[in-house]
Amino acid sequence: MGNRLPNGQRGAHRLLLHVTYDVRALIPELAGDGALPKTNSQARKWRDAIDEKLPVWIRNKALPAIQNHAAATRVTVKVRVEATDLLIDYDPLSTGTGYVPPRVKIEFGARSTGEPCEEREITCDAAEHLPNLEFPSAKPRVMLPTRTFWEKATAVHVFCKQGSVGDRLSRHWHDLVRLDDAGCAQNAFDDPALAKQIAEFKGKFFREKDRNGNLIDYTAAVSGALQLVPDAEALEALEADYKKMADDGILLDDAEPFADLIKRCADLERRANAKPTRR
């Protein structure tokens, strides 16, 4: 299970995959009939069990699968695990500015059901430009872009409330605008039930505090208090990160000026907060 952008829309061109293991399948002894935890204490037990089981599954299942495939296809790579990330290092043909290392990073998570979702055929971007070569394809289950929007929007909200945008995070702001270009943001705004579901889930499984030590209220965020534009200091750091990403060619041909990107995010924030009574 992974996040995706809709057809025709590209996120930041990075070698990063997000894979979600359905939390109910990973810890069936706690999930029982599939109902999600109703209290914070129940959710804490789920989180503790996830933190114990997911790294073991990655080492015992995901890592050997990648290693065996690399050996079978005679690809020269180094595969290793760091916590819940599976890293595949390869020899690059070019180095760029160094913003993106020569590595495929697969980030595994198990604090979600991944729903709503659908099966989508995934093909290589290079296939249409190299018709004489045969490229692999896959048909994974992926989250619907409406869920992807709310997942990213609430993550950006947390970054803004904490006042720190971190390193290599400007891609999330870029992806929000690409989702809006495809009409997915408006579809997300028109689905208050999904917004509420994600907010309640993240409140149990992704508990975060703002810069003042207060617990971030996801339900309030999707009910008229969403913040997508950081304060001045964080905005400066975000712009610097965005420039590095653009300079390294990560955004291909759609690296709009940073000021335009933030203007679009401010508009998204306004539209998301315009009808709080609907949530």
Image: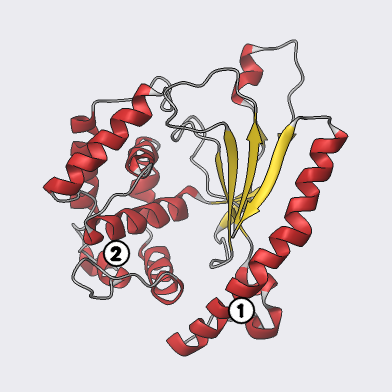
> What percent of the width, then of the height, locates residue 96?
46, 21
> What percent of the width, then of the height, locates residue 155?
36, 57
Secondary structure of the residue carrying numbered label 1: helix
Q: Is residue 138 visible?
A: no
Q: Is residue 231 left or right of residue 178?
A: left
Residue depicted at 60% across the width and 38% down the height = 104
Q: In which quadrant of the rendered image does the C terminus lie?
A: bottom left
Q: Is residue 270 left or right of residue 121?
A: left
Q: Nearer the viewer, residue 11 or 85?
A: 85
> What percent of the width, then of the height, locates residue 36?
54, 80
- What kind of residue is marked 1? Ala
> What percent of the width, then of the height, locates residue 213?
23, 74
Can you tell which mark lies on residue 97? none
Residue 103 picture quarter? top right
Q: In which quadrant of the rendered image does the N terminus lie?
A: bottom right
- Numbered disc in front, either 1 or 2: 1
Q: Which residue is mark 1?
A: 49
Q: Which residue is mark 2?
A: 222
